[in-house]
Amino acid sequence: MIPQISFSILLCVAIFALAFNLEVGTVGVASNLSAIMIVLGGTLAATLIAYPWRRLVGTVRLLRKAFSSKDEIDWTRNTIVALARTYQKSGIRFLEQMGEKLPEGYLKTAVEHISYNYSRDEIEHILNKEAQLLYSRYEAADKIICSMARLAPALGLTGTIVSLIRTFGHISDTGGLVGYMGIALLSTFYGVVLANLCFTPLSNRLREFMDQEALRLDLIQEGILDLYDQENPVAMKYKLESLSPPSTSGSEARIVASRPKVVVMAAPKIQAVGASS
């Protein structure tokens, strides 16, 4: 962590050293790159000081999953019902074999707990603990994105102050003073844009994904406990349907479908902070 913080501090020093010494006289490519360097580079450096690198990588992976994932409520419900039918007709061995075909994730782990002959209370306790761990990971990712949404406008204002300081050095050039003021406002513009059109929407998308996963996790917990109690599969199906929203797809997913999905516990909604004036 110390090398990462040292690198982040050096990155901040380098960014502002370039900002103060880079000669930019007109609004163009160079001035835009300078503003983006201060806002985006400064936001990244400040985030690296506050959070470990592996959590930033995990946040990026989580965002990719949030944008690429599909509604799997139907697949989860149908899979649990199929597992219940197998368990009722063929016993624990066939249930274990079907569990091995499931993709890695919360559901597969929950089925394994039944095959390990844990008691009902032990299964419920383990599932709750695993859900809390998954919840903390999602909450940490959302917290990082909200932090970046707060940092971007502040770094934009900082870039504007840097440009204004340099503008005072050219106060005698009244003809080019308007151009220097335009350059000064670019950093604020990029800070507001990144906060409100990038980081805040990403946070909202992540929370929407977390809400969907929370519902899916509830279905798995209810279904696994009913599976342990060997409830009637038809009754389980109606119960799980009452806990899930109406189907958005008419296709039935098969239990053997391999889907690289890791189910996690979603966090309660965290108010994203946008740009502040």
Image (tube, rainbow, N blue to C red):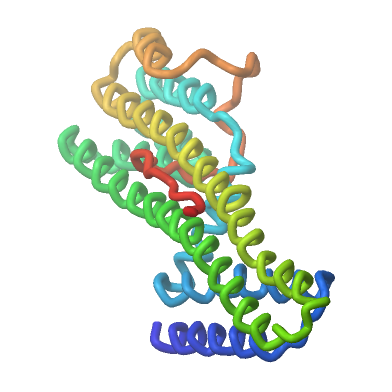
Residue for point 58% across, 33% down? 256
Give the number of callouts: 0
Q: Nearer the viewer, residue 1 or 161?
A: 161
The N terminus - image quarter: bottom left
Q: Is residue 83 above or below residue 67?
A: above
Q: Position of residue 215 (x, y in %)?
A: 40, 29
Task: Identify whether 51 is placed above or below 61.
Answer: below
Quarter of the figure with residue 126: top left
The image quarter in which residue 162 lies: bottom right
Q: Kindly identify the residue that appears in the image at 64 percent across and 83 percent down.
A: 168
Q: Is residue 242 above or below residue 33?
A: above
Q: State left or right for residue 221 relative to residue 37.
A: left
In this image, 39 relative to 139: left or right? right
Compare residues 258 and 150 and report the one nearer the observer: 150
Q: Position of residue 119 (x, y in %)?
A: 17, 36
Which image quadrant is residue 14 in? bottom right
Q: Which residue is at 65% across, 59% downward?
A: 189
User: In the visual, does 221 lie left or right of 38?
Assistant: left
Residue 184 percent across, percent down from the top left: 67, 71
Position of 86 relative to 100 (above/below): above
Residue 68 rendering spot, x and y as whole percentages: 64, 42
